[in-house]
Image (spheres, rainbow, N blue to C red):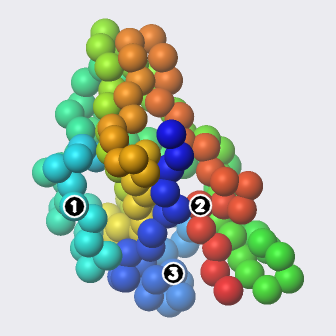
C-alpha cells in the first residue's frame, strides 16, 4: 500500500504565499475522509467537505488531529519543505477505515483546506483493525515542498 503525494488546494497556495496560513504557527490538523469524498482542488474550507469525514468512532474524533512538532525548513538549496511528526489513531472497539487524509488550518474561521492525500493508490480504504494504529508518516522531504 502506497499513499499518493499530497495535493495542495488552490486557495492554500495563495494563502501560504500571502502569509495567511502560518504552517508552523497555526493549529494545522489532519482529518480522515471516506471514499465518498471526491477531492476538488477548488474546495476552500472544511465545511465544503466535512460531510464526507469518517464517523467519530473507534478512536477517531471528528475534525482529526493537530500536527505536532511542525517545521518549515530548507528542502535543498532551491526549495522549502513542511513536515511534522507522524499522526496516528489507535482503533478501539472496532476498525478505523479511511480513503483520504485532508490537512487544514484550524486557526482560520473557514478552516482553510491545505492539501489532501489518497491513502492507498490502488485505490482502496486503509483500515486499522481494533487495537492497531492507522499512521500517517510524512515523507523525509515533508508533506510538500515549494520551489
Q: Secondary structure at mark 1?
A: loop
Snapshot quadrant of residue 92:
top left
- Mark 2, residue position: 143
Tag 2 and tag 3, C-beta contact below 8 Å: no
Residue 43 position in % (x across, y down): 25, 73
**Residue 87 bears which disc, if any?**
none
**Residue 62 sits above or below residue 91 on the image:** below
Residue at horizontal 17%, vertical 50%?
36
The local crowd at label 2, few if under 14, some if 14 to 19, many if 20 or more residues have their Cα within 10 Å, is many
Residue at horizontal 18%, vertical 65%?
48
Q: Quadrant of the C terminus?
A: bottom right
The mark nearer the N terminus, 1 or 3, is 3
Residue 144 position in % (x across, y down): 59, 68
- Label 1 and label 2: CA atoms lie apart by 20 Å
Please state which of the two labelled residues, at mark 1 or mark 2, is closer to the viewer.
1
Q: Nearer the viewer, residue 141 or 15?
A: 141
- Mark 3, residue position: 16
- Mark 1, residue position: 38
- Label 1 and label 3: CA atoms lie apart by 23 Å
Residue at horizontal 34%, vertical 69%?
112
Q: As drawn, which residue projects farthest toward the left?
A: 51
Count numbered badges in the picture.
3
**Relative side of 43 to 27, left or right:** left
Snapshot quadrant of residue 62:
top left
Snapshot quadrant of residue 71:
bottom right
**Relative side of 72 to 62, left or right:** right
Please state which of the two labelled residues, at mark 2 or mark 3, is closer to the viewer.
2
**Residue 34 sits above or below residue 107 on the image:** above
The local crowd at label 3, few if under 14, some if 14 to 19, many if 20 or more residues have their Cα within 10 Å, is few
Amino acid at each position: 500500500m502506497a499513499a499518493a503525494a499530497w495535493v495542495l488546494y488552490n486557495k492554500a497556495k495563495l494563502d501560504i504565499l500571502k502569509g495567511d496560513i502560518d504552517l508552523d504557527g497555526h493549529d494545522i490538523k489532519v482529518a480522515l475522509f471516506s471514499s465518498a469524498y471526491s477531492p476538488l482542488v477548488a474546495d476552500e474550507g472544511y465545511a465544503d467537505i466535512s460531510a464526507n469525514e469518517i464517523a467519530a468512532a473507534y478512536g477517531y474524533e471528528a475534525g482529526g488531529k493537530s500536527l505536532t512538532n511542525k517545521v518549515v525548513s530548507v528542502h535543498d538549496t532551491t526549495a522549502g519543505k513542511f513536515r511534522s511528526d507522524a499522526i496516528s489513531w489507535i482503533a478501539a472497539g472496532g476498525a478505523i477505515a479511511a480513503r483520504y487524509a485532508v490537512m487544514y488550518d484550524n486557526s482560520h474561521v473557514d478552516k482553510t483546506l491545505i492539501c489532501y492525500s489518497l491513502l492507498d493508490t490502488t485505490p482502496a480504504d486503509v483500515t486499522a483493525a481494533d487495537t492497531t494504529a492507522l499512521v500517517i508518516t510524512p515523507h523525509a522531504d515533508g508533506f510538500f515542498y515549494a520551489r
